[in-house]
Amino acid sequence: MKFPFGLNKNDVKTKYAPLAAGLVGITMAGLTIAGVTDDANGTAAKAKTVAADVQPLAMTAGARAAEGLAAAAAEAKQKDEAKKRAAEAQRKAEARKAAAAKKKAAQAERRLLVGTTKASYFWDDGSGRQGDTGMPASGKPMQKGLFASPSWPLGTEGYVIYKGRKAKFFIGDRGPGVPSNHGVMLDIDGKTFAELTGGTWDPNTLTVRGNGGLGHIHVTYVITKWGNGPGRPGKPVPFSTGAWRE
């Protein structure tokens, strides 16, 4: 074989054969690298495609979770507001019920006469002690709640108020006598007088102790029922008028 450019066979074998082999190796390596690059590019493309497909799903799931939390919060708020409304409604209902009961009680209580007077205390048990004039005129035994009036009908009912303290009574005796000419128009039983004035009742001496020596107090009286016994309804008058016999 004849080689161009003045090359001979030995030159080709010794000088240029290695070069040709290297060129061939470089070419094969290039092809391999290209194949690997193509494979890498393909994998990346696939990953990108998968990411593109997954991202909307993730966003949708997150949005649904957020919506769920918001819905739960809204429901909890509605329940809380419903409880508050129910509690307020119950409070108002109870207030209306209490007001109605108070109004009914006020209507049921007949305030036939309201006034103020000076009052003393007594305990007529027939023992003759502490000015005892005998058993009560009504025939009932002396007891707590039995008051005496110089003019109101026996059996009259009502209550007195003294410094915020209230005590019920019925008229079961006559008196005061002479003191009623000076404005003392009510005799309170000793036990009730002790409670009204913050003292204690001494059954041995028939006196009230521990109330600062009070023997007379100014009270507000309310008559709720006139008795059927002898006496005169209306504003109290002194015993000396004889109204107690009417």
Image (cartoon, grey):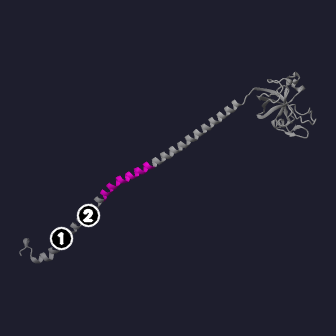
Asked if the magenta segment contains residue 97, the reply would be: no
x and y percentages locating residue 41 in the rendered image: 27, 61
Say which residue label 1 marks: 24
x and y percentages locating residue 9 in the rendered image: 10, 77
Q: Is residue 25 left or right of residue 3?
A: right
* Residue 223 in view here: no
Front residue (pair 81, 65): 81
Front residue (pair 31, 11): 31
Say which residue label 2 marks: 39
Asked if the magenta segment contains residue 60, the reply would be: yes
For the N terminus, the image quarter is bottom left
Residue, x 7% and y 71% (percent of image)?
A: 4
Please tell me how crowded label 1 is: few (under 14), some (14-19), or many (20+) other residues with Cα within 10 Å: few
Q: Are marks 1 and 2 in contact (CB under 8 Å)?
A: no
Front residue (pair 186, 88): 186
Q: Secondary structure at mark 1?
A: helix
Q: Label 2 amino acid?
A: Asp
Count of numbered tags: 2
x and y percentages locating residue 97 in the rendered image: 63, 36
In the displayed structure, 1 sits above or below 139; it is below
Q: Secondary structure at mark 2?
A: helix
Look at the image and give the residue range highlighted in magenta.
Answer: 47-68
